[in-house]
Amino acid sequence: MAGRWRVAAVTVVALVVAGCTTGEPAPTATPIPTDVLAGISVEIRQGRSTWAQRVVQVRVTNAGPGDVSVTGVRLTTPDVEGVAATDKGRILRAGVDRDFSVALGDPVCDDDAAGAARAEVDLTDDAGARSTIVAEPTDPQGHLARIHGEDCAGVAVAQGATLALADAITTSDVDGTLVANVRLEVEPVAGGPRVEVTQVDRTVLFAPPGGAVTWPVTVDTAGGAGAVILPTIAGRCDLHAVADDKRGTFFGVHTRVDGVEQPVFYLPSSEALRTALFAFIRTACGVPADG
């Protein structure tokens, strides 16, 4: 855990208080003491509930000796457009961390994009001192790189094909196990690159029969529109996991675009499909209709 406290390239910027209209220079605000600022670190996190919305959390940790308040957070990265920001204020007591959710802009899928993520955190203390921490946030779980891969795989695939999960399912009994048949449909985009769908990953709640973790798929837009059935069983039956589900109806798709392997990206289920899948899992797990 020691690496969590490290913050790269930290700069402390004293904010300026608006001055009077007397023509004299505006006074500079008193900065927060350096020993307090030295304990502030910034890290990127992402909760499962905000994955689909491309919202990340900027976690600000106060390992210093004094309480401060966070009054604004801004995150920039070469992989997305604009500044992801929030002005939601929160008290950050010594020894405590707080998460600040920021929505990422549109993806930048340019091979020439370069640079590091940059976070700015505006701070005040009870004495009215103000400073801004400027830092390269740590990202120990690689959220920003993963998001960039998902974003740009989706963009590349969309140039050549429209992928969608059908709203409705059919069910069947296979050797005594109830199976839902989920349909993945692929429609070529005229004039777009060739798209091959090669694999779909199981989810937390739904899986291929027989213990497999993926569905092998062969759909190629070179041959026109196509569809494939994903035979699906209930991956787990504990009602707590089902009730708390955040990602169980997002299916990870593996593709090639003009022969180039893409990172996995996720197809969401429509509300109609989600309803059908949750009804299926309740039936497959033997949950009474009023349970």
Image (cartoon, helix red, strand yellow):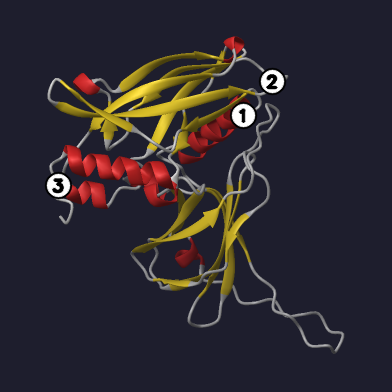
Whether residue 191 sits left or right of residue 172 in the image: it is right
Residue 197: give x, y in percent of width and height.
Answer: 49, 18
Pick the front one: 161 or 273: 273
Residue 181 coordinates in the image, percent (x, y): 33, 27
State how far apart marks 2 and 1 are (Cα): 9 Å
Taking the image as shown, residue 209 lies to the left or right of residue 188, namely left
Placement of 273 over or under 61, stated as above or below: above
Q: Residue at x 38, y 47 (%)?
A: 48
> Does any portion of residue 133 appear in the rendered image?
no
Q: Residue at x 58, y 73 (%)?
A: 130
Numbered tag placed on residue 192 in the rendering:
2
Q: Which residue is the site of mark 1?
A: 158
The C terminus lies in quadrant: bottom left
> Pointer 2: residues within 10 angstroms few (<14), some, or many (20+)?
some
Residue labelled with disc 3 = 287
* Percent of width and height locating residue 206: 28, 33
Q: Which mark is first along the chain, 1 or 3?
A: 1
Residue 201: horizontal and vertical position, in percent?
36, 26
Asked if marks 2 and 1 touch (Cβ < 8 Å), the reply is no
As drawn, 233 above or below 212: below
In the rendered structure, which disc, 2 or 3, sits on the residue that comes first in sequence? Answer: 2
55 relative to 235, above or below: below
Q: Which residue is rendered at x = 50% and y = 72% of the image? A: 89
Q: Amino acid at mark 1?
A: Ala
What is the quadrant of residue 22 in the picture?
bottom right
**Amino acid type assigned to the residue bearing label 3 in the image:** Val
The answer to whether one can see residue 195 in this image is yes
